[in-house]
Amino acid sequence: MNNTLKARMMLGAALLLAGCNGPRRIRERPIIMNGDRTASQDRLIAGAAAEGYSDNAALTQARDSVYAKAAATCRGTICASVVKGEISLGMTPSQAMAATRTAPAAWTLRESGAASVMVPRVLGNSPRDATGEVVMVQFDDDRVNAVSYRETQGIRVVSSAADTTTDGRATAMADALIREGDQFNAAGDRARALDRYDRALAMKRADAMLEYKVATMLDLQLRPIEAQIRYQRFLQSLQIERILAQGQANAQLADAIARAQQRLIVLERQAPAPAVSPAPEPRRTPPVFI
């Protein structure tokens, strides 16, 4: 009897435990019952559209106000730059905004005495003018004295009239490529360094030191024929007597000249001598007997 009772108790406990560990049903209140209808969203959409229209109208009015002020205060080339949409030196803040077709809400202005700096409020959405993406505009006595553009090679700064020309921009891009090539050269990546120097040389042809850097890269990559030509172009582009007469003022350039001359001598000696065809034997005329 005791064993039977114990068995029944164990069976009941097992059944109770199995019931506790079984699947559970959770009855949640449905969000929408069958046949129910959601409230119309037309009022919310109309409200958002009206708010967006109001913001757009306010922004347009602010841009028009800035443009009108810029047009009323500009003269000569400044007016032409505003019309073309290009920031130029000597502009006022309102004229610079008008050139980028923006309003004060797009910029953050920081003033420090007579100097002030204007940067985009959001870097991911920087204003642009006809030249490119503008990342900083600096003013002196409320007149633009420097403009910074974001370009592929980095930040290009326009701070003089020469920088605004096509040649000035090409020179700035070439200088950026040279700096990038110097960094690759310092890291031991000569292939990329030569690539940057070649691209810079296409924009800045009259640069003797750049010719020397290209010649050095070619020499290190065991390309003697092209290196020899580059060394010769480097030496021919210089007035050696004038440079040597200046002494220590051009010590680095004088050292480059000496190295280029030494490498030319070595490369010319290593160059294979041109094949010389043997001279034809003299034709013998048979004797004539009289």
Image: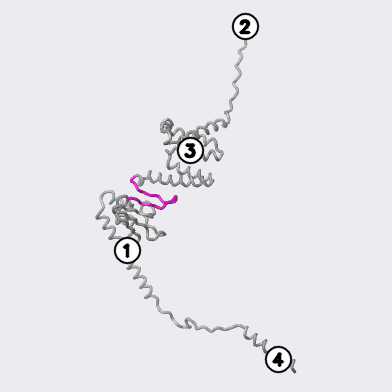
- The disc at residue 212 is 3
- Foreground mark, 1 or 3, reads 3
- The disc at residue 59 is 1
**Image coordinates for residue 195, horizontal then vertical, percent:** 50, 44
Residue at x-position 45% and y-position 36%: 251
User: In the image, what residue type sits under mark 3?
Assistant: Tyr
Residue at the spot of label 4: 8
User: In the image, what residue type sits under mark 2?
Assistant: Phe
Q: In which quadrant is the N terminus drawn?
A: bottom right
C-alpha gap between disc 2 and disc 4:
154 Å
* Lateral position of residue 146 relative to residue 29, left or right: left
In the rendered structure, are the residues bearing label 1 and label 2 in contact, judged by CB atoms less than 8 Å apart? no
Q: How many marks?
A: 4
Neighbour tally class for label 4: few under 14, some 14-19, many 20 plus, Cα within 10 Å: few
C-alpha gap between disc 4 and disc 1:
84 Å
C-alpha gap between disc 1 and disc 3:
54 Å
Residue at the spot of label 2: 289
User: In the image, what residue type sits under mark 1?
Assistant: Leu
Determine if the magenta segment contains residue 156. yes
**Image coordinates for residue 240, horizontal then vertical, percent:** 43, 31
